[in-house]
Amino acid sequence: MKLGARLTTHAFSAGAAGISFIVQPLPGSDQLFVIPIQYLLTASLAKERRASLSKAAWSQVHQIIWGGGALRLVLTMTLGLIPLAGAVTNAITAFVTTEYLGHYVDRALDNPDKPTPALSIQDILDSITSLFTTRAR
């Protein structure tokens, strides 16, 4: 991931996490903010490269964004009842899903002629570990 894309992704991820933490007491309200932030991240990364995502990549982007939203909602309904645990969990899931989205979009833009990368648990784990183990190119 190039430095510009990495910094953009980190900024959007931090914003999504902060908003999720703040609005967590109202179940599901973070979706009103985090989902648009994630779509804006996708558009920003594409604009930085002066490229567009294929229809297949957009399909995967929708799955990441709405799947992350569903995950946050389920965790809010379960852990949200525990003071502070729900807010922290909400912020972490918003951060991680936004980071993964940024990595996914960056990879899809790296290889626009190839099929879009598959979504898998291993791919998510690899993206998260690369956040802490690799440096920007």
Image (tube, rainbow, N blue to C red):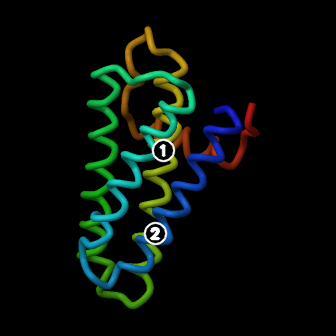
Circle 1: element type: helix
Q: Which residue is mark 1?
A: 100
Q: Residue 77's image quarter?
A: bottom left
Percent across and percent down for residue 63 are: 27, 40
Residue nearest the observer in this picture, 54 or 50: 50
Percent across and percent down for residue 122 are: 46, 37
Residue nearest the observer in this picture, 127 or 27: 27
Say whether disc 2 or disc 1 marks the residue closer to the N-terminus. 2
Furthest residue toward bottom: 83
Percent across and percent down for residue 113 are: 44, 9
Q: Quadrant of the N terminus?
A: top right
Residues at badges 2 and 1 in contact (C-beta under 8 Å)? no
> Up-down: is 119 above or below 13?
above
Percent across and percent down for residue 68 are: 33, 53
Who's the residue at 41% across and 47% down the image? 40
> Up-down: is 128 above or below 28?
above
Mark identifier at residue 34: none
Q: Which residue is mark 2?
A: 91
Mark 2 surroundings: few (<14), some (14-19) or many (≥20) residues within 10 A: many
Who's the residue at 37% across and 60% down the image? 34
